[in-house]
Image (cartoon, rainbow, N blue to C red):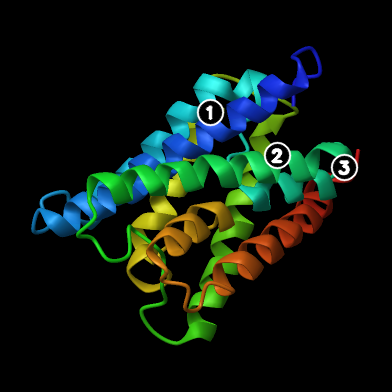
Amino acid sequence: MNTNVPVLRTYLAEAVGTFALVFAGTGAIVINDLSGGVISHVGIALTFGLVVLAVIYAIGEVSGAHINPAVTLGFWASGRFPAKHVAPYIVSQSLGALLASVLLWALFPAHESLGATVPAGAAGQSFVLEVVLTFLLMFVILCVAIGAKEQGMMAGTAIGATVGLEALFAGPISGASMNPARSLAPALVSLELSQQWIYVAAPVLGALLAVGMYWGVYGKD
């Protein structure tokens, strides 16, 4: 979070960034389903990775481009983010995600799930996958990001590539959400709420575990 930017602008940036993530990412799922698979699973994974990369470069210097409640909680737990801004960030991210899902519903009302994430197999399997995926993502973020300013020109590429990679190999099983806002928004709008606890609890747990690992590797200093 950039303390030189008015706080309301950082909240707006998080809302816009999360809107872009959900609109592009879940939009790719919706359009792929309705077009008979033209985009493909690989295309969906690339879409998620590329939109994250774009958003980081667009708003990273304003809000830090968390665009994910689990990431915000991870930054707070690591001591890099003030507690008083955690709730407003999560609310902003949730509103942006909901707006994206509502717009997709208006555009594609025939689609049943709007890209909501659901386990393809056992709930426990997807839970563990989401914990590990978010753990790896948060660890990468902590390693390349310093406050609101991304470290070097390749930080956005590293984070976006991690999102794309994880979506590529784990998407068919758990959906590779790693983001409560990304999962809950389409689930709420489409009323497909089964097993959504996985996509809230697992990313938060994974992000917090990553903080502990980061301290273990680099130290608290």
Q: Earlier in the sequence, mark 2 or mark 3?
A: 3
Circle 3: element type: helix
Crowd tier of the residue under label 2, counting other residues whose Cα lies within 10 Å: few below 14, some 14–19, many 20 or above? many
* Horizontal side of residue 197 vs 80, given as left or right: left
Q: Which residue: 83% across, 50% down?
A: 77
Q: What residue is disc 2 on?
A: 89
Which percent across, then down, holds residue 196?
A: 53, 72
Q: Mark 2 or 1 closer to N-term? A: 1
Question: Callout 1: 10 Å neighbours few (<14), some, many (20+)?
Answer: many
Does 74 sit above or below residue 89?
A: below
First-in-chain label (1 vs 3): 1
* Residue assigned mark 1: 56
Alpha-carbon span between mark 2 and mark 1: 15 Å
Marks 2 and 3, how far apart in space? Answer: 10 Å
For the residue pair 171 and 181, the one nearer the viewer reads as 181
Left or right side of 14 for 21: left
Tag 1, which secondary structure? helix
The answer, for residue 94, to whether it is visible in the render is: yes
The amino acid type found where label 3 is placed reads Ala
Vertical order, 109 against 155 (above or below): below
**Which residue is the site of mark 3?**
83
Q: Nearer the viewer, mark 1 or mark 3?
A: 3
Residue shown at 77% from the left, 53% from the top: 211
Q: Judging from the image, what secondary structure is the residue with disc 2 in?
A: helix
In the image, what residue type sits under mark 1? Ile
Q: Residue at x 61, y 65 (%)?
A: 200
